[in-house]
Image: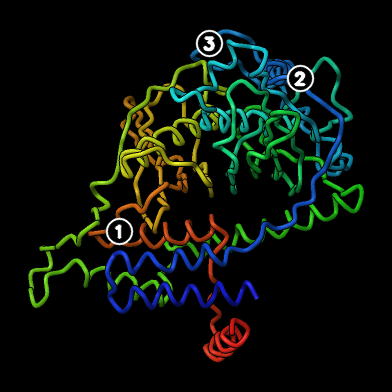
Amino acid sequence: MHRLIARGAGRILAKCWSTGHSNRASLLPCAFFASQKKPEDSCPKLRSDHCSGNLADVVQSIRKRVDVDFGYHTVPKPRDHLLKYQPKLEELPTRSMLDSHTTVVLPLSSDEYIRERYVNHLGRVRMGRVMEELDMFAVWLCHRHVLLPNLPEDVPLPYTFVTLLVDKVEFSNIERLKANHDIHLSGHISWTGRSSMEITIFVQQLADGEYIDVTKALFLMVARNANNTGSAPVNPLKPGDETEQAIWKEAAKRQKQRRTAHTESVLNSPPREHEQAIMYNLLKRTTIPDNMDLNRRILPPKCRWMQDSQQTTMISPFPENRNAQNTIFGGYIMRQAVEISFIMASIYLRGRPILQCISDISFLSPVKVNTFLQMTAYVVYTNKNYVQLMTVAHIWDVQSGEDRTTNIFYLTYKADKIVDEVLPRSYREMLWYVHGRRKLLAALKLEPEYPDDPKETEADEKKADTENK
């Protein structure tokens, strides 16, 4: 039933654009979506009593396992001698999800020094800082999963763990978070490939005797060899009970969806038919009637150009945020992306937005400690009281003159009022607009499905109409 509603609602949205409705009319379908929002999927959770202490304990444990010395060296400590200790896949024993499961505490209630690192000017919790810690926690869960039985006790782990992507981070109860209450991070490995691992992390806060759910995050990590020049095998994951089996099944399904989503991205393949209609009518809405000058565009009321809705900052990363290879931690980059996107969203809606979802964070290449990092946050789509941002991380190497994109982030914010509609001017911006629309629908779990068979589509719509009556 919900799938049929989503299909029908998607077509209502496409039809609204194709008929050239005004800005306020084009916002109405989002209200329809919101009223028909699907319930949260049941999420099986793994539980154990294991605790790894606080985050400082975790950092110390990781340093000890990989033998990272304190002190910065422009040339990283050589680790080539550890390559001979890398095992073959068949030498690794299977592991269960319970083997990696643990909890880490951020002691905001008892440590004022730590608390100050997590509080913003409004006295609320800095979500960018929480994202940064999630990345470090994900690395620790990889360490807990990987077991090399033949590794001598006095030899460091000949592995490096790299963040490949962050699938989705959904937030809830952010307005209830308090900066003087402990935050608990718990998680485990939920899927493994040959060298890749999916990590599921839950964030909760203990307040007034009850745990408040803050977010569920999905990380995809990759195991690399000691000097990060090639892949390394990880222990196969074997579900230990029915709960782990259910978690594995959902994780395997997500892995297939990731491959499909990449190939079907509007940045890799042409927009769908209904999206092409949206793009055409965007052009009609912003072009002077009966005027052959295509360079002259008009901005409808309560709208803003996408090119005027962006913020850029340049950052010089420092060694304190590096790993053993002198590349910047992914968590640091995520924190910077969250914070600049919050600034852009706040400026756009002239208020304080609430972060709803971060999705599809891709790590395309490492960021070296001696490069400059450029972060640009774009408002790429708006609908009613939601703002969709795309934040791009770009590095500049002043010595070689090389520049390239390293990360792309998609962040969904919610406002307490109707926001102005953002409109694209160029074809490239139109693709970003369509892509942002997809991300918003997916973030709100409202992404419609569009079957290829028109007969099936018509039958579904008739069935949905009958059931709604």
Residue beneath the point at 64% across and 10% down: 69
Residue designated by label 3: 72
Amino acid type, mark 3: Tyr
User: Can you tell which of label 2 and label 1 is closer to the viewer?
Assistant: 2
Amino acid type, mark 1: Arg
Q: Which numbered disc covers residue 271?
A: none
| Quadrant location of the N terminus in the rendered image | bottom right
Question: Can you see residue 410?
Answer: no
Q: Residue 242 at x, y = what percent?
A: 90, 53
Residue beneath the point at 62% across and 18% down: 78
Colour basis = rainbow
Instruction: Give me the C-alpha separation between circle 2 and circle 3.
Output: 26 Å
Amino acid type, mark 2: Gly
Q: Which numbered disc covers residue 53?
A: 2
Hey, which quadrant is residue 180 in on the image? top right
Q: How many marks?
A: 3
Mark 3: few, some, or many residues within 10 Å (few <14, many ≥20)? few
Residues at badges 2 and 1 in contact (C-beta under 8 Å)? no
Q: Secondary structure at mark 3?
A: loop
For residue 19, above or below residue 205: below
Q: Secondary structure at mark 2?
A: strand
Q: Secondary structure at mark 1?
A: helix
Residue beneath the point at 57% across and 75% down: 5
For residue 40, above or below residue 346: below
User: Can you tell which of label 2 and label 3 is closer to the viewer?
Assistant: 2
